Image (cartoon, grey):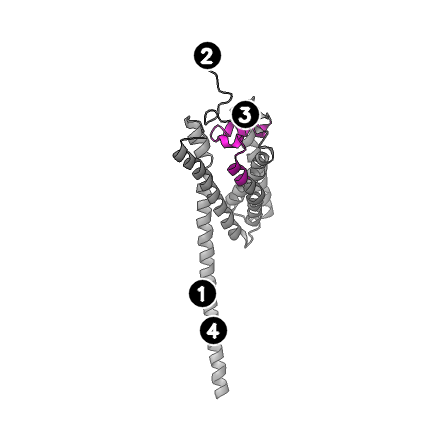
């Protein structure tokens, strides 16, 4: 008796993914299209920022590019998922095929999982615009750039922690894994593709907190010096009145 073949390649085995259609575009083409479009967008934005603010240094330009990339991914790539989550499995659009490829590491993206819809909706409608605001503030050297950066970095760290924790807790307590076991899907897609959102925000958060702390310390010292000067002036005035 022939063993029935699964209707799709996703884990956990037997998970329901109605109307699934396999991708028709090779993986290298999908990845090249994504990285090419993203790279050109970030490069164009970086050139525009440098022209707008010639004094923007290499570190500032790197931070600007990071937030532009995040704004694009959150608003466009993840935005597509939020708006089309029910049709991704059957669609052959470029973004749908990219999601189906990534879903080999996390099938929750093809099952309209409530947690994924919730966290991705917040990412699209709140963190995406916030990343764009961060990029603009960085390009303008705005005093708001560090407060905005701190908020965005905490959001990214919290989001990636929840993303890892929910799936790993489910695996620990129920034995259900949403990722295929192959190295490329678990370690490259699931771990590797999300790890930058744990490393880069942690570094930027540390840098911004250190910068704000240093600025506040300098301001406190200036206020203390000014207060001392005012006290001396008031003392001199009182002495002159007495004379």
Q: Height in image: 67 above or below 99?
A: below
Tell me the mark number nearer the camera, choosing from 2 and 3. 2
- Mark 1–mark 3 CB contact (< 8 Å): no
Q: CA distance from mark 1 to mark 4?
A: 12 Å
Under circle 4, the secondary element is helix
- Is residue 110 within the magenta segment? yes
Which quarter of the image is occupied by the N terminus? top left
Alpha-carbon neighbours of circle 1 within 10 Å: few (<14), some, or many (≥20)?
few
Q: Position of residue 128 (x, y in %)?
A: 56, 43
Tell me the mark number nearer the camera, choosing from 1 and 3. 3
| Disc 2 target residue | 2
Q: Position of residue 66 (x, y in %)?
A: 52, 42
Under circle 3, the secondary element is helix
Residue at image x 46%, y 41%? 162
Q: Nearer the viewer, residue 180 or 241?
A: 180
- Is residue 70 within the magenta segment? no
| Disc 4 target residue | 229
Residue at image x 56%, y 36%? 78
Q: Which mark is residue 29?
A: 3
The mark nearer the N terminus, 2 or 4, is 2
The mark nearer the N terminus, 4 or 3, is 3
Q: Which mark is residue 221?
A: 1
């Amino acid at each position: 008796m022939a063993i029935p073949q699964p209707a799709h390649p996703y884990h956990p085995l037997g998970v329901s993914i109605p109307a699934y259609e396999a991708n028709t575009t090779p993986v290298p083409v999908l990845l090249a299209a994504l990285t090419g479009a993203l790279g050109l967008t970030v490069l164009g934005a970086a050139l525009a920022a440098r022209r707008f603010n010639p004094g923007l240094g290499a570190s500032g330009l790197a931070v600007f590019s990071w937030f532009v990339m995040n704004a694009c991914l959150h608003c466009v790539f993840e935005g597509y998922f939020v708006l089309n989550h029910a049709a991704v499995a059957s669609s052959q659009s470029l973004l749908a095929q990219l999601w189906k490829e990534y879903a080999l590491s996390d099938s929750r993206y093809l099952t309209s999982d409530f947690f994924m819809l919730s966290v991705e909706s917040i990412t699209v409608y709140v963190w995406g615009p916030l990343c764009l605001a961060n990029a603009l503030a960085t390009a303008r050297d705005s005093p708001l750039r560090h407060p905005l950066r701190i908020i965005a970095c905490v959001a990214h760290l919290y989001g990636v922690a929840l993303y890892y924790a929910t799936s790993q807790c489910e695996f620990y307590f129920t034995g259900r894994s949403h990722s295929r076991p192959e190295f490329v899907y678990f370690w490259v897609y699931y771990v590797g593709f999300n790890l930058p959102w744990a490393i880069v925000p942690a570094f930027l958060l540390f840098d911004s907190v250190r910068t704000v702390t240093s600025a506040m310390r300098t301001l406190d010292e200036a206020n203390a010096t000014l207060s001392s000067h005012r006290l001396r002036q008031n003392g001199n005035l009182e002495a002159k009145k007495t004379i």
